[in-house]
Each structure stands twice: as C-alpha cells, then as structure tokens.
Amino acid sequence: SQQGEEDPQALSIQEGENATMNCSYKTSINNLQWYRQNSGRGLVHLILIRSNEREKHSGRLRVTLDTSKKSSSLLITASRAADTASYFCAPVRGETSGSRLTFGEGTQLTVNP
Amino acid sequence: KAGVTQTPRYLIKTRGQQVTLSCSPISGHRSVSWYQQTPGQGLQFLFEYFSETQRNKGNFPGRFSGRQFSNSRSEMNVSTLELGDSALYLCASSLWGWETQYFGPGTRLLVL
C-alpha cells in the first residue's frame, strides 16, 4: 500500500513548544508530501521531500526522511495557536502513479494558547 | 496565480438525485484529482484526470464519474445519491500529478 500512516493520532501542546509528527509507509517512493488541513477546509501543501533528500526546511517546519526505515517526521518549532490543524503525509511512488495520494487518518495537533 | 476553485461550495440533495461538482485548476495545471472526505472513511481518492483522460481511479462504485475538458476544468458527477455520499469533496491540481498538489476549498454535499 502507498498509504502513509501518521503517528500520533492526536497531539496537544502549549504555544511555543515544538511538535513532532511521524509518518510511516510501506513502498518505495519518489517523494513524500506533507499537508495541513484546518477544520473542514481544503488541504494546504507544506513540504515535498524527494527520496534522495534527507532533510528539508521551510520556515518553522523541518521534515526528515529515512528511506531505509520508510519513515518521515515533521517538526514544527515554536508552535502557535494557528498551527492547530490535522496533518497528513502522502508518500508518492513515482511518475506512473500520477496524483493518487493516499492519506492516513492524520495527526490532529492542538496548540493551546 | 489564482488558486483552485470549486463550485458550488455547499449543496443539499435528496436520496436518488444526481449532482455535478465543478473544479477549476490552477492555470497551466493538467492534472486534476478528486477526493472524498468523511468522518468515518477519512480522505479517499476518487479519480485523476490528466489531459482529458482518466489516469487513475480509486475504489468507488460506478455512480461516481468525472470528466475533464480541454481547458483542464473538471467535473465529477454522482448519480443516484445515497445518504453515505454526504461528504466534503476536494479537488486538487498539479502540473504533472506526482508532485505538489494544490487543493481547492471543497464542496460540502449533504444528502437527505
């Protein structure tokens, strides 16, 4: 299965703390993508990390990828209340798989002010 | 660039009716995908269209269909609506399909 499985299912932290979410998958990949979804809205793309990359940064976000363990992690530093959302990872096998993103249940992050 | 737009944003239908949802991708994007999100099943892939051809299909019954026009705009149709079709329907566009997906705000469908 190409599906990513996020862990933990729920995470509650205080504003200013760091939040770490993990993603595991089972197949070889071309890239892995992280998305955020605020309640009842569309998904927002956060970061795409390719299989030949080990770490990528974007603002307060840091994503790591370990293809040998088939896992990825998303770190949000200095969290804010506005970071409260569901976070999903989506492993992508390659060009032939097209845009078929398969999502797990996501990690529900709550940042308390 | 304008983002992905979906119309309508909200829709109420009754069982047995059919519905058509529309998605306008980001200009230049050739891939449009559709997803269904429900509390019980989560986010599920419906299908993808690329250059007017269905390239990928999820595990949904034939009541769910779609098409893509030459300007890359896409429509999805659900016939003979069931209560379980109540969901948030999201479309996403990308240049080629396997890279960053840009999602629209969704259409929330309620079937009574």
Image (cartoon, rainbow, N blue to C red):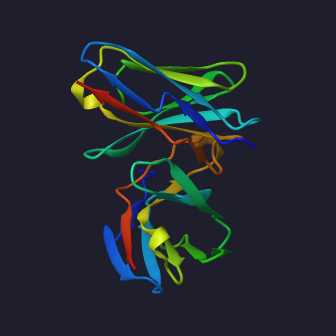
B97 to the left or right of B57: right
Q: Residue at x 51, y 42 (%)?
A: B105
Q: Residue at x 44, y 57 (%)?
A: A38
Specify the farthest residue to the front.
Answer: A113
Q: Is residue B31 above or below residue A22?
A: above
| Image spot of residue B80 (x, y percent) | 30, 14
Q: Quadrant of residue B68?
A: top right
Q: Nearer the viewer, residue B104 or A50?
A: B104
A28 to the left or right of A6: right
B19 to the left or right of B91: left
| Image spot of residue B111 (x, y percent) | 27, 25
Instruction: Give the position of the C terminus of chain A as an image quadrant.
Output: bottom left
Q: Is residue A8 above or below residue B3?
A: below
Specify the farthest residue to the bottom.
Answer: A17
Q: Quadrant of residue B48?
A: top right
Q: Is residue A70 above or below residue A60?
A: above
**Number of on-image labels:** 0
| Image spot of residue B16 (x, y percent) | 26, 13
Q: Nearer the viewer, residue B9 or B106?
A: B9
Q: Residue at x 77, y 35 (%)?
A: B28
Q: Nearer the viewer, residue B6 or A29?
A: B6
Q: Nearer the viewer, residue B79 or B97?
A: B79
| Image spot of residue A58 (x, y percent) | 66, 72
